[in-house]
Amino acid sequence: EIVLTQSPGTLSLSPGERATLSCRASQSVGSTYLAWYQQEPGQAPRLLIYGASSRAPGIPDRFSGSGSGTDFTLTISRLEPEDFAVYYCQQYGNSPTFGQGTKVEIK
Amino acid sequence: EVQLVESGGGLIQPGGSLRLSCAASGFTVSSNYMHWVRQAPGKGLEWVSLIYSGGTTYYAASVKGRFTISRDSSKNTLYLQMNSLRAEDTAVYYCAREGPIYGRAFDIWGQGTMVTVSS
């Protein structure tokens, strides 16, 4: 099983700031199979990024993904109030696994 | 509108059984890869099970032999039969569609149904 480790656990930032979230895999992941999700309290996850760097329909361009192999990054260029949430990376190797999540909170 | 709606959660005693349902609209369940994902209170997401369009099924090691994923094409509904439930199965259970053009990412999620296993 591929283990995904996200860092940091919590990111404290102000609106307008840049957020950089990391996702590291225990073994190489095909870029096609790396996704990012946003989850707000009490809500289902929402797909943000698929294929490591492609935005899902309707996702603002302030969200971007990058990376390959074992290291992937989600960047939010300028935080909006609605962006404060928990973010998960996911890989689809032999079976899907998720990272433990990064909480982006208001500083 | 494309959506998934789960039902069937509730309070169940350890060792008991429960069947979750996930009704789809706007697309055909049997033509897609469908998953169950769960989230224990205050915890992260855990993949549970998958059914391919061809009918092949897969399970996480933690539920294999106890849970069964299935679907009913006439009702356009996905199911998760959960037997021998344990306290550690307590979670919100989501059904999700694996997006056909999204590199196997999950593009559609239901709102979730809560399962509490407790005496």
Image (cartoon, coloured by chain):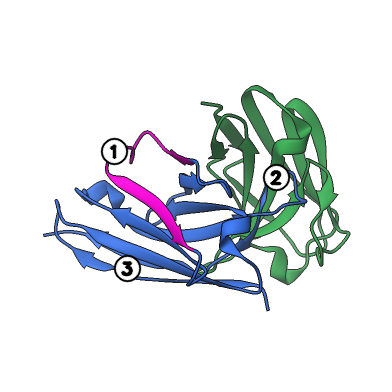
Chain colours: A green, B blue
Residue at the extreme left of the image, as rendered? B119
Look at mark 3 in the image and give the residue it sits on.
Answer: B9
Inspect the image, locate mark 2, and give the three-letter code of the amino acid beneath it: Ala
Inspect the image, locate mark 3, and give the three-letter code of the amino acid beneath it: Gly
Relative placement, left or right, of B17 versus B7 is left
For mark 2, name the chain: A
Percent of width and height locating residue A4: 58, 33
Whole-Å distance between the Cαs marked 3 and 1?
Answer: 20 Å
**Residue located 55% across and 64% down the image:** A44
Residue at the extreme front of the image, as rendered? B74
Whole-Å distance between the Cαs marked 3 and 2?
Answer: 28 Å
Is tag 3's residue or tag 1's residue first in the polypeptide sequence? 3
Foreground: A107 or B28?
A: B28
Relative placement, left or right, of A60 versus A13 is right
Q: Helix, strand, or loop for circle 1?
A: loop
Residue at the extreme right of the image, as rendered? A61
Query: Alpha-carbon neighbours of circle 1 within 10 Å: few (<14), some, or many (≥20)?
Result: few
Percent of width and height locating residue A25: 63, 27
Foreground: A7 or A63?
A: A63
Look at mark 2 in the image and give the residue it sits on.
Answer: A35
The label number, if any, that marks residue B65 in the structure image: 1
Q: Helix, strand, or loop for circle 2?
A: strand
Q: Helix, strand, or loop for circle 3?
A: loop
The magenta segment: B57-72
